[in-house]
């Protein structure tokens, strides 16, 4: 049994390969991880930031407690409703495009909430913030996880079915769909586990 090499044997352009033509690991994924961490942290802070300014907003707009409750919950309605559509958009356009559009929309909706002149405009802006912030966390998670599940050079080629981490490898593969699952405690040697993150 040999020790698995930590370098992959995928040829890349000349500037990213070593003398032996083997890809070298870079720090790009850690930089992306830190960038996404900051983005998601700002996203979470932005969700609750209205509660800090709420007493001033309530006084300026002369809002009843019922309207304050509507204003606070406007974000969460659209955020929850947009989770599945955002996942479909990620599958269709990819996480980078969805996250870019979400961040641009998020900035516009946040600016609109700053320009709000009354309850209705603030309510619509909060709905917009919910819609656009829903597109930040799923692509961030998708981008982060894609770096952890790359296959090594000696692993089996990916199947034609979409990646579904909650489905065991023996059930996801169409060529082995008719074979029974492995016995408890047993593992299949033909489908190696993805490398650890």
Image (cartoon, rainbow, N blue to C red):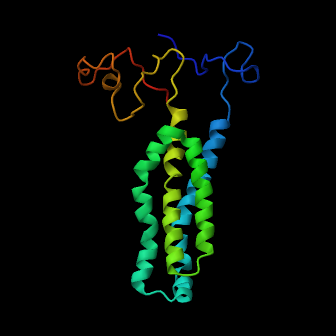
Q: Is residue 51 visible?
A: no
Q: Is 146 left or right of 193, judged from the image as shown?
A: right
Residue 90 versus residue 56 in the image, above or below: above
Q: Is residue 146 visible?
A: yes
Residues 3 and 80: in front is 80
Residues 73 and 15: in front is 73
Task: Please name the residue shown 61% across and 20% down the image.
Answer: 7
Residue 17 versus residue 68 in the image, above or below: above
Task: Please name the residue shown 72% across and 24% down the image.
Answer: 16
Q: Is 149 left or right of 178, judged from the image as shown?
A: right
Residue 117 versus residue 43 in the image, above or below: below
Residue 163 versus residue 34 in the image, above or below: above
Q: Is 87 left or right of 184, judged from the image as shown?
A: right
Indicate the quadrant where residue 70 lies.
Answer: bottom left
Q: Position of residue 93 (x, y in %)?
A: 53, 40
Q: Position of residue 109 (x, y in %)?
A: 58, 65
Q: Position of residue 56 (x, y in %)?
A: 56, 85
Task: Please name the residue shown 67% across and 24% down the image.
Answer: 24
Q: Is 100 left or right of 3, judged from the image as shown?
A: right
């Amino acid at each position: 049994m040999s020790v698995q090499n930590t370098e992959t044997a995928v040829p890349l352009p000349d500037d990213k390969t070593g003398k032996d033509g083997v890809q070298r690991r870079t720090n790009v994924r850690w930089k992306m991880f830190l960038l996404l961490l900051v983005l998601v942290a700002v996203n979470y802070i932005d969700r609750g930031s209205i509660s800090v300014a709420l007493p001033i907003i309530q006084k300026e707009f002369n809002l009843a407690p019922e309207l304050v409750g509507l204003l606070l919950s406007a974000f969460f309605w659209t955020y929850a409703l947009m989770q599945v559509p955002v996942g479909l958009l990620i599958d269709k356009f990819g996480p980078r495009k969805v996250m870019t559009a979400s961040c641009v929309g998020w900035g516009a909706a946040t600016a609109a909430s700053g320009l709000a002149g009354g309850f209705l405009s603030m309510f619509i802006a909060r709905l917009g913030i919910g819609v656009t912030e829903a597109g930040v966390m799923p692509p961030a998670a998708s981008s982060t996880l894609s770096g952890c599940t790359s296959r090594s050079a000696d692993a089996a080629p990916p199947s034609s079915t979409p990646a579904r981490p909650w489905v065991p490898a023996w059930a996801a593969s169409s060529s082995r769909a008719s074979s029974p699952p492995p016995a408890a405690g047993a593992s299949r040697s033909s489908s190696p586990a993805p490398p650890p993150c």
